[in-house]
Amino acid sequence: MRESTTRRMKTVDTKTDPGLSWAREWVPATNEWGWMSAWHLTHIAKGALILLATPSVAILNMGNWKPSRLVLGLVAVLASILLVGVSSASAMPEWSGGTAIDQPFLAKSLSCPSSSFCVAAAEGVSPAIYNSGAWTFRPGSSEHVSCTSSSFCIGVAGNDASVFNGTTWSAPVQVTASTGLPRLDAVSCASESFCIAIDEHANAYKFNGATWTAAANVAGGEFEFQYAVSCVSETFCAATDYGATSVYNGTTWTQHNILSSGELDAITCLSESFCVAAGTAEVRFNGATWSVPAEIDGAENITGIACESVTTCVAVDRRGDALTSSGATWSAPTNVDPFKSRVDFSGYEEPRFTAASCTSAECRAVDNQGRVFTFSGGTWTGPAVLGGQLLSVSCPTGLFCAATDNTGRVLTFDGSSWTAPTQIDSAAQINGITCLSASFCVALDGSGNYTTYNGASWSVPSSSGLGGAGRAISCVSDTFCMGAGLNGVAKYNGSSWTAPTPVPADGVSCASESFCVSVGANEAAVFNGTTWSSPTQLVKNPTGPVEFESVSCPSTHLCVAVDYDGRAMTFNGSSWSEPTPVETSLESVSCPSTTFCEAASEGGVVVSYNGSSWTTQLQLMIGGVTHVSCASFEFCMAVMEGSAFIYGTPGSHGEEARKIEEEAAAKKRAEEEAAAHTGGDGEAIITATTSHVVTPAEPVPVLGQRQTVKPVSGTVLARLRGSSGFVPLSAVKSLPDGSEVDATSGRVIITVATSTGTVSAEAYGGRFVIEQEHTGSDETRFVLSLPLTGCPRVALPHGSAAAVASSKHRPKSRHLWVSEKGGSWGTNGRYVSTSVEGTHWLTLDECDKSEVKVVSGKVKVHDLVHNKIRTLTAGESYVATRR
């Protein structure tokens, strides 16, 4: 057996040539080397030019050929200038866990028992508490909240409730009978000893100051997945669903059908003889009857309503407007949000109000961006900002970063910690930022304004001329920047902006004052120091939309652009490469050198480029990375939602590495130009790029929390739990439990975790909510959710799927096919539920009946109306009808 030996490569004094620290690396040596992978060779000879032959290899090291035996029959040639400046004595940097620095506050509820005390609640974060002029956060978990004083609040989230005593929130207590659906959707307290919470299925739960008990169904057995409730005493509460109201007299609930179409989303009561409910229309209760519905806000939905008195109320809508009433007369909708009129929200969720609350002296309203506005003396003021979603980050070194969010705030990083968010722009979100040092940054906001940082303070935002949406900016000096916006790309000289040039302008990057590249949609343009080229099409003959949103140019010889479909393309200064599939939904790319790039996806995955191939580094978390910035190959920062993730060690090598890379890149360019494609003896050097290597990271299902999804054919859409709209399933790889899938025109494979592994099922032909038990059976249920039209409001059995449409254009029947080979699965229809293992079956719903048909295997059918169970085999069917 041949023994292997080692020999040390020639060492170089890094003080005189710091870009060659790789030369201290060890490489294996044998008399003859067989075939080896390019990945293996990457780790044994960084910085060397390697020719692969069979059966031997020749290595060009420090300019001298040292062949073991060069075979004339050359089979493959690999020329790769590999990463310089990396010490072999240390491991490659890694991504750290996320640090919450600017938590998004997607407010759902607001309760103000007095002018000096309010609580705002949002999904996934601690409630925000306003007390004597300042907002703070107290650890807790609430999505909907009701307070009677500064020392008593009830908050509900999911299946649980917590009590706030003026200082802390209690541990959550389960209120609903089971976990998962239905979840608590509203709460109202008349006193510390009387609260009512209502779940998505219209079940009401009563709190007596110590314990929770279940009360009657608010809607007489029907449930519509949308409720609000207001209580003024133990003997009077009023609640809303889609088009109906229900009144509680201390014992029973009485339902009143108000709207034949439309919704009632919000309600407030001052007494047993005065309530106002609103949504697509407004109705009032006088203690005996409800008024005729009146339209007060056009086609918009009122999402929050509150009253100072019976003569003064405010209403806020999903468009971000507010209305005020004087008696029964409402004002026209008024924009009270400066973001509304000054930001292009293409690709972002528009600000919309979600809740309102009034005292006898003033009112407050909160929106889905976590901003609170105050109405007092007939005037709206604000906003106070409770949280934000990070949009952009720039790190010139490992000792300084600046990040911006969607509420006009900025945070800075000093190598060890982040500052608190500082408001620098009250009118718009800040979409792009670039920093050359800790004393120079330029940021662009969503209305096309710019602001600069001098190391101590930010300037007042001023117009850049880019139009209604500043998107990206790149600077090579404090007197040369390129900004991209709605009207194109414009140059900044340190004091003023040129007129925009109408070229693709979603992303821009400059390597020098005479070389910039901009991208947008399926086009790119190049700046030569004087003019911009005509746009060039990037993806030839695309089969669908193409959205290149980010580009990074570390040199005039390399730019890397990424698009939302997960493709990457490179530009060598004269032509673009073919697109390479890398990772779905790429949002941002940063290249500090020609041999190191990091790109981040909406799915939270980071991928790395070494100058020739892409590899997946890590899934940072479930959720979208909005931006990534790398100071060097040893330090990067990525931001997503409210968290920051660090690659490498801040401050330890960042500045030194940046200098080394700049010197190495300059040296490499000079060598390339001098070589002019010839070797030292004048003979041509044969080169070939390495093949693209992609190892995508697959999300993993989590029992009772998250399922993975994969479209099979057709069009499949998904609505993530807590969101309001559907998105293509291609944009997500996993869904939180309780999310909705629309496979009416496609097929999808759902994979879930169990206590013993994972199982999958294929569903098609229907729309459904995924719900998995996380204790006991691990059963996954598909609850039919396509709204039906024309169905009468009737009492439905517990466990039914009973969505009824408010639109007259919805279908009168719905169905879902499911096929699986193992695990525990089931469906919920209007009058039936099923449980199966290893079968193929259909569940069909109409207003008056539900039907189950079995193609193969066995299905256990539970007739929810007659409370009986029947087992079906292949070819059999069962129909359950309404009484």
Image: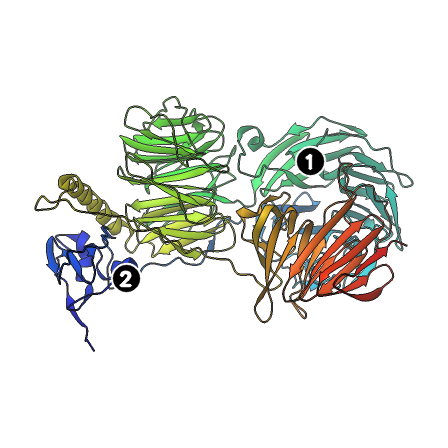
Q: Quadrant of residue 671?
A: top left
The quarter of the rendered structure image containing the N terminus is bottom left
Furthest-bottom residue in this view: 1
Q: Which amino acid, by three-letter code, is at mark 2?
A: His
Distance Cα–Cα, label 2 vs label 1: 62 Å
- Identify the residue shown where x is 80% and y is 63%: 862
Amino acid bearing label 1: Val
- The answer to whether residue 692 is visible is yes
The image shows residue 74, relative to residue 489, as above or below, that is below
The answer to which of 744 and 274 lies nearer the viewer is 744
In the rendered structure, the answer to whether residue 157 lies left or right of residue 510 reads right
Is the residue under label 1 in contact with that under label 2 (CB below 8 Å)? no
User: Which residue lies under the disc numbered 1?
Assistant: 316
Q: Residue 261 location in percent, x, y?
A: 80, 37
Q: Residue furthest toward the top?
A: 499
Side of 738 where 409 appears, left or right: left
Residue at 71% across, 55% down:
783
Residue assigned mark 2: 40
Q: Earlier in the sequence, mark 2 or mark 1?
A: 2
Numbered label attached to residue 817: none
* Of residues 588 and 45, the one drawn nearer to the viewer in this rendering: 45
* Front one among 219 and 611: 611
Asked whether residue 417 is in view, the answer is no
